[in-house]
Image: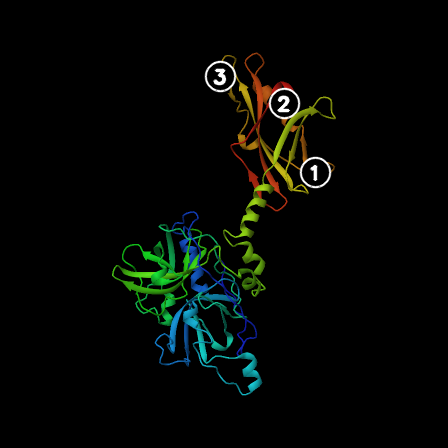
Amino acid sequence: MTGRAHGPMRRGPVAWGAAVLLASGLAVSAAAQTPENSAEILERATEAVFHIEVTGTPSDPANPTQEAARSGKAFAIGPEMLVTALNVVGDETEWMLARTTRDEVTRAVRPLSRTVQLTDGRNFRIPSGDVLVLAAPARAVDAAGIMVPDLKLKDYFHFSMCDIVEGQHYSALMTTSQQPGDARSVERLELVPLIAAGYRPGDYGALYLFESEGAPPFAPEPWGHGGSPILDADGNVVALISAVTVTGGGPIVLATPISPLFPGLGPMLAREPENAAATQAQLKCSMVDAVRQVRNQLKSHAIWSIAPRPADNPDEVDIVFEYDSAIDPPNISSIEVRYMFFGTEVEGLPAGRIPHRPAAEDVITLRPNPKEPRTFVTSEIARVGRVSVANYVKPGNGAIEFVRLMIKAHLTTGEIVENRTKYYDIQWSDLD
């Protein structure tokens, strides 16, 4: 687990931002469970979840939905990028336009009469002048991006493009403070078990309904929870909380899903230059994720052909390991071959492994032939059989019947591929 390195915070307005585009989707994919890495998630939340306080001058003070003071949460999805609920920060239709000292700047920047204050779980506060909010173009989508160019987070959350599954279990990273609108509430974050309850368009539009498992540990206040992430079993974000409300059955959570219908994710991540490629590669259930999984399967799939052949030394026999794969150029840098001899130590007993020495010693590492990069050759296994094992089995009492080989491949990427259930047998008569 890594922490955060804060660079010097600039005290002037930042010059760039990011949009977050979220959309609802159908719940049709595999089930999710409570994250197993809960401790890691809570540790990350200390630095990657923020309390957000917003104050300003509403464009229509008489409108009860345009409150002058609001609060919620935001979570990091990159070194300099946060996500929150749009209803927390509002947009140009909800705040008055602020005037600058120069009209041409006002026309170009169109600053809003709004102040955004961020505080993390360590009570680290980010000045409003270092925060830039750019809401989603579609107001029907309750999500907004927040850019803090000097934040330099080293740990953050990742989106999941997997569909939410109705009836399955998820976890919301929420404050259990009885005053969720207070800045110190971010210091009391817990993983709250939720059950996905589906859509109710007639009541909640495109928001997805989650119900708490058992007595909810959070206070069902109107402000303070919006923007909190909802996580799948892997700790990836599947939705963000838009509102917490109370019905006859108790508190419920309304959330904006991150689904396969999510538009504009690529452009949004492109605004995060230090993390765009890495974040897109980690999008669970995305096309990039699917392609990566296929490629991982291909690069780890090798069809081996193993056979003896006469060695250059007429007194020895080589074992040749050759493989075919869909990856070009060849991607196996070395193989580790574990070998065991089977037969009978005493004539008349059932065949079994001949324990001539500890199994841990029966390992050899081979590197490819420079002229044939998919070929590995060794005469050592046959030599060990003739010198060590054959002498262990006294003539007339038993004999070696075959050699069993298991392969562990080391890829050029540093990964290791091993199938412990796959083995290859060579008759000893072909080696002796």
List the residue tagged with mark 2: 387
Give the amino acid type for the residue marked by disc 2 in the picture. Val
The reply, left or right, for residue 40 in relation to residue 388 is left
Marks 1 and 2 sit apart, C-alpha to C-alpha, by 30 Å
Sequence order check, earlier mark of 3 and 2: 3
- Label at residue 373: 1
**Residue 70 in view here:** yes
- Give coordinates of residue 143: x percent, y percent: 45, 66
Q: Is residue 422 above or below residue 122?
A: above
- Give coordinates of residue 376: x percent, y percent: 67, 34
* Residue with the most extreme bottom position: 101
147 or 254, nearer to the observer: 254
The reply, left or right, for residue 182 in relation to residue 364 is left
Give the amino acid type for the residue marked by disc 1 in the picture. Pro
Mark 3 residue element: loop
- Give coordinates of residue 9: x percent, y percent: 53, 74
Other residues around mark 2 within 10 Å, as few (<14) / some (14–19) / many (≥20): few
